[in-house]
Image: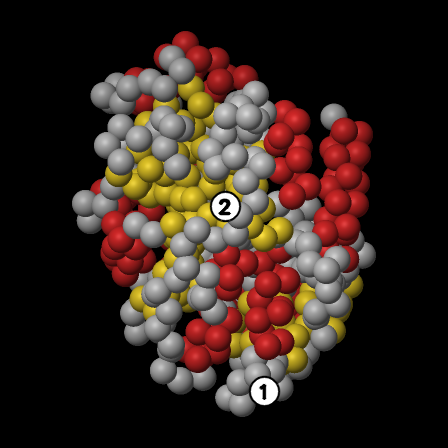
Amino acid sequence: MDSRFVRKKILLLDGLTSQCLEYTKAFNELGCDTTVLCDDLFDTCYASRHPKHKILGVSNVRDLKGTEEWILKLVKSNQYDVVIPFTEYSATILSHHKKELSAYAHLIVNNQDVFDYAQDKNNVMKVCMENDLPCPMTIFDAKSVADILSTDIRFPIILKPRLGFGSHGFHKIESKEALKSCVEKFNIDISEMVVQEYIPQEGLNVADNLFIDKEGNVKSAFTYASYRFYPIDGGSGVLNETINRDDIHIISAKLLKAMGIYGPIGVDMIIDARDNTPKVLEINLRPIACAKLGFLSGVNMAQQILEDLYGEEVTLMCQYKTGIRVCRSQIDWIWFVKSPNRFKTKPSWFDRRNTTDQLFSWDDPGPWFAFFIYGFRKFLRERKER
């Protein structure tokens, strides 16, 4: 418990997410009074014993209008000191209403102009290229297939939305003919897409996770690498491990400073195996999904958020434990069944050293089972929609 922050009322959005659960526990340990907005009885945090208060409302990407209404209502109730989002859509809602809602609570989100600029992946690539920071070769201002083919970019290439969440709309294009076919088949507006070189997947996918204080100083940074993914051809990491590479921290810090971004931020990169260079892919303007790795490795961003917010000296936490692993066990089992490399992958699927489950703990098993039920229901819903 930290006497500086006892009884601070914290509203945590997006109770479905695993990072919301980890921040709830961290704020509780600081002596705060935590409330979580959930969308479903089987949301991770609704099934947990850790939130002091739980609100069952609307909080999901399928109903952005309803989510916005609930967030505005809760913040305007004037019951909370701090509000923190954990998904892109809730962070967008807070940022777009920041001027209005800041009269009621502190919002842990960047101002709308900075937020919207950084949300556009093409803008991130432009800042990288202007500041000599490594990133995939990217074509700007293309409006047609002909515009792309008139450049010197080599196939395969990537098409993905400039704005949006997750991997929806991601296409790997192998040839000129495939490009024309893809654009026609999916009725793609190229002006709304990122067009860039494909980086071979032999290298690691990594994420650098930083806390930047209001003065623009890096107060913590930890990096993790993803070793297994599901879906196998480009989904979310199911086994993540803390690593340390100073070049990744340096690139991230320069990029965020150039863009004027602060708070808890994630920078996604891929290590280009051809030259071992980490290349920037995008920015996440919120606490990242694998926040548990930070807390386990000695980086307490919940504490840093409150220190920065209330004018305290933000504790420097740039040294962290490496080799700490977090596994999403339910999805990792599916990976094992589906992957042709189940016995060849490194680290081995059977190697459980320094590995903690993303959701399961003996003192709070509810989130693990809730996630299992939620995932099964989601599978049935998507199967019905198909």
Residue at the spot 79% in from the left edge and 45% down from the top edge: 373
The reply to whether residue 65 is visible in this rendering is: no
Tell me which label, 1 or 2, sits earlier in the chain: 1
- Which label is found at residue 240? 2
Q: Residue 365: where, in percent of width, then height?
A: 75, 57
The residue lying at 23 percent from left, 45 percent from top is 133
Q: Is residue 35 above or below residue 275?
A: below
- Circles 1 and 2 in contact, beta carbons < 8 Å: no
Callout in the foreground (1, 2)? 2
Quadrant for the N terminus, please: bottom right
Q: Residues within 10 Å of mark 1 (few under 14, many from 20)?
A: some
Alpha-carbon span between mark 1 and mark 2: 33 Å
Q: Nearer the viewer, residue 338 or 356?
A: 356
Residue furthest to the bottom: 3
Mark 1: amino acid:
Val
Q: Position of residue 151 (x, y in %)?
A: 24, 22
Report which residue position mark 1 lands on. Answer: 6
Residue 150 place in picture, x, y as percent = 26, 19
Q: Is residue 99 left or right of residue 336?
A: left
